[in-house]
Image (cartoon, rainbow, N blue to C red):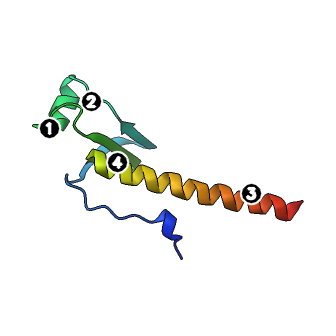
Amino acid sequence: MKHPAGHLIIDPVFASVAHYDEEPDCFIAVDFDDCECEPCTVDRGPIPMYATISLGLVAGKTRISQRLTAKEARRIGKTLLNFAKVVDDVADVGKEDLA
């Protein structure tokens, strides 16, 4: 059962983009600032610089990129912070039980 503080579904304004990489890897990339380099400019397309946040998730050879509006990013951030508090609270209860 999912804790309500740790569950969020967003129907984003922008579509997700899946990329296939030759070399497997595993990481999360959040680019708060776009730049004027060619890859960023191509990825951004007609979207003005600094108008969105780019979130990327790499698992194995698949890389998913998602552009977020500021409102979408704030919703994700709020959910992460709220659930991190739940995790901290559970960890604190566990420490008390062990004492």
Q: Is residue 22 left or right of residue 96?
A: left
* Residue at the limit of the structure toward the right, as seen here: 99
Distance between the alpha carbons at the discs numbered 2 and 4: 15 Å
Percent from the top left, x then y, of residue 46? 9, 37
State which tag comes first along the sequence, 4 or 1.
1
Hey, which quadrant is residue 47 in on the image? top left
State which tag comes first along the sequence, 3 or 2.
2
State which tag comes first along the sequence, 2 or 1.
2
Residue at 31 percent of width and 30 percent of height: 33
Q: Which residue is mark 2?
A: 34
Label number found at residue 73: 4
Percent from the top left, x then y, of residue 1? 54, 77
Distance between the alpha carbons at the discs numbered 3 and 4: 28 Å
Q: Which residue is mark 1?
A: 47
Q: Is residue 66 left or right of residue 2?
A: left
Label 3 residue SS: helix
- Graded by Cα atoms within 10 Å as few (under 14), some (14 to 19) or many (20 or more), the crowding at tag 3 reads few
- Graded by Cα atoms within 10 Å as few (under 14), some (14 to 19) or many (20 or more), the crowding at tag 4 reads some
> What's the amino acid at mark 4?
Ala
